[in-house]
Image (cartoon, grey):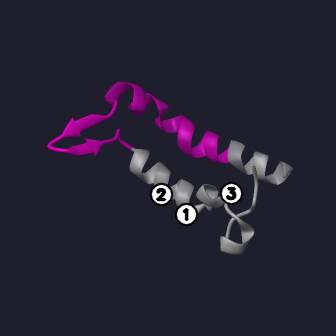
Amino acid sequence: MMSIVEEAGKFCEEVLAPINASGDAEGCTWEQGVVRTPSGFKEAFRAYADGGWIGLASDPEHGGQGLP
């Protein structure tokens, strides 16, 4: 469990923290029925998904870790 917490901290430090400024400065916008996110948010979400973070609470039978 501690390794997951350490990796989560590293992900936050290396991926999420650097885009806080663009998130604050640009914000999200609504353009012709489409939500636009600030610079770096799409790539950060892709890194989050590719890193398997989305499935941590999923059942191990379905590829998750079964975490609360």
Residue mark closest to the camera, 2 vs 3: 3
Residue assigned mark 3: 56
Q: Do labels 1 and 3 touch, CB within 8 Å?
A: no
The disc, 2 or 3, on the residue closer to the chain's N-terminal end is 2
Amino acid type, residue under disc 2 in the picture: Arg
Residue at 34%, 30% (x, y): give it.
27
What's the residue at 28%, 42% (across, down)?
A: 36
SS label for mark 3: loop
Image coords of residue 2 (percent x, y): 85, 49
**Magenta-span inclusion, residue 33:** yes
Mark 1 burial class by Cα count in 10 Å: few <14, some 14-19, many 20+: few
Q: What SS does tag 1 mark?
A: helix
Which residue shows up at 71% across the image and 74% down it?
A: 61
What segment carries the magenta color?
10-39
Q: Do the residues labelled 1 and 2 touch (CB within 8 Å)?
A: yes
Q: Residue 12 sits in which quadrant?
A: top right
| Residue 23 against residue 52 in the figure, above or below | above
Residue 26, picture quadrant: top left
Q: Nearer the viewer, mark 1 or mark 3?
A: 3
The residue wearing badge 1 is 50
The answer to whether the residues at label 2 and label 3 have Cβ atoms under 8 Å apart is no
Q: Name the residue under label 2.
A: 46
Classify residue 33 by image quadrant: top left
Give the alpha-carbon distance from disc 1 to disc 3, as whole Å.
Answer: 12 Å
- The label number, if any, that marks residue 7 in the structure image: none
